[in-house]
Amino acid sequence: MAELIDGKVLSAQIRSEVRTEVENRIKSGKRAPFLTVVLIGEDPASASYVKGKAAASAEVGIGSDTLTFDASISEKEVLDVISRLNADQKVDGILVQLPLPAHIDERKVINAIDPAKDVDCFHPQSVGNLVIGIDGFQPATPAGIVEMLQRSQIPTAGKHCVIIGRSNIVGKPLANLMLKKGIDSTVTVCHSRTPNLPEIARQADILVAAIGRANFVTADMVKKGAVVIDVGINRVEDATRERGYRLVGDVDFEAVSKIASFITPVPGGVGPMTIAVLLQNTLKASNKQD
Ligand code: NDP
């Protein structure tokens, strides 16, 4: 039976480390780091993520505020908000909660963020730094995965890491992190046009599922003893739950946990790690601005 990699426990360790560093900053006469989140529209999932980020910031002593705008806000108005936040010396980190309404060009908005405040690590400069190995902000979900592996003492050097999914948020930045010197995995990235995906998945020492389809990774796609990281968050109907659904990952947890050596649960796996890395990035941003 696979050992569970507990994202709640590991993310609590990171949050506690960030809290100590924030306290040290304040003791040395510096101000607390500050994160501003921009939330546009009424998407309930986005609103709930933003609430989680604000609560996690408060818990470690990071100040935060959320600027909320109606979905009808124009692209120009959003760009003006970003430009004001870029100039505001009290704001260390800027996070624009995605997705944005269709009439706003996400790329334009992300590109407008000062790279020194880009705590989501989405700006092309941040992504470029990641690819060429310059230290900077960490992409939150991928870095959360690496933290999970390292804090669980799972070796990565020379291991074959197969990532299913090539998004700009998870698959691509994770591939770059796993390739980095010091992490040293051999990386394969699969996507919807990969014909022999189960065969490739079975070669993985570390298998990461970032697809967005419930129970996509079945037991026959996993090598015995592989480490399985489940990034997916999917709603499946569940009449026994008050809200009518429950959250599951991309991996058939029950069957795969009988084959894998380590596995992450959903919820309580990668999700909490993502927020912890965001806090690390905000702290880093404030240290840079000193
Ligand atoms: P995207 O939809 O942007 O990307 C999904 C990827 O999966 C694409 O590369 C797509 O391939 C690939 N894919 C889709 N269907 C198949 C298929 N049948 N076979 C092979 N590959 C397929 O999703 P994200 O990367 O943003 O998110 C993935 C999942 O992770 C979602 O459930 C999301 O909710 C979750 N997530 C969780 C986070 C956390 O903190 N835990 C953070 C971010 C995301 P192609 O490119 O060819 O279309």
Image (cartoon, rainbow, N blue to C red):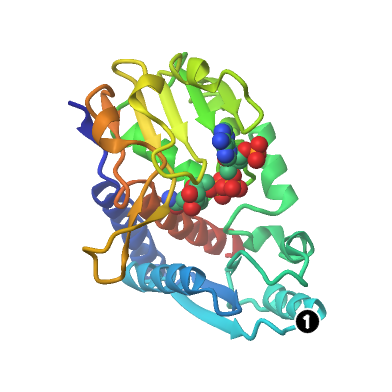
Residue 148 figure quarter: top left
**Quadrant placement of the C terminus:** bottom right
Which sits in the foreground, 250 or 109?
A: 250
Residue 237 figure quarter: bottom left
Which sits in the foreground, 261 or 89?
A: 261
Q: Which residue is mark 1?
A: 74
Indicate the quadrant of ligand 1 in the picture: top right
Q: Position of residue 145 (x, y in %)?
A: 42, 39
Furthest toward the front, the residue is 239
Report if residue 136 is visible in the image: no
Above or below for 135 versus 283 = above
Which sits in the foreground, 98 or 27?
A: 98
| Residue at x 50% of width, y 15% of height | 199
Say left or right for 225 vs 278: left
Q: Position of residue 186 (x, y in %)?
A: 54, 17
Q: Position of residue 77 (x, y in %)?
A: 77, 82
Above or below for 75 versus 179 = below
| Residue at x 26% of width, y 63% of height | 239
Report if residue 111 is visible in the image: yes
Q: Residues within 10 Å of mark 1 (few under 14, many from 20)?
A: few
Q: Position of residue 211 (x, y in %)?
A: 52, 41
**Quadrant placement of the N terminus:** top left
Residue 4 figure quarter: top left
- Residue type highlighted by circle 1: Ser
Furthest toward the right, the residue is 76
Say left or right for 175 vs 199: right
Say left or right for 276 vs 73: left
| Residue at x 72% of width, y 84% of height | 73
Tag 1's secondary structure? loop
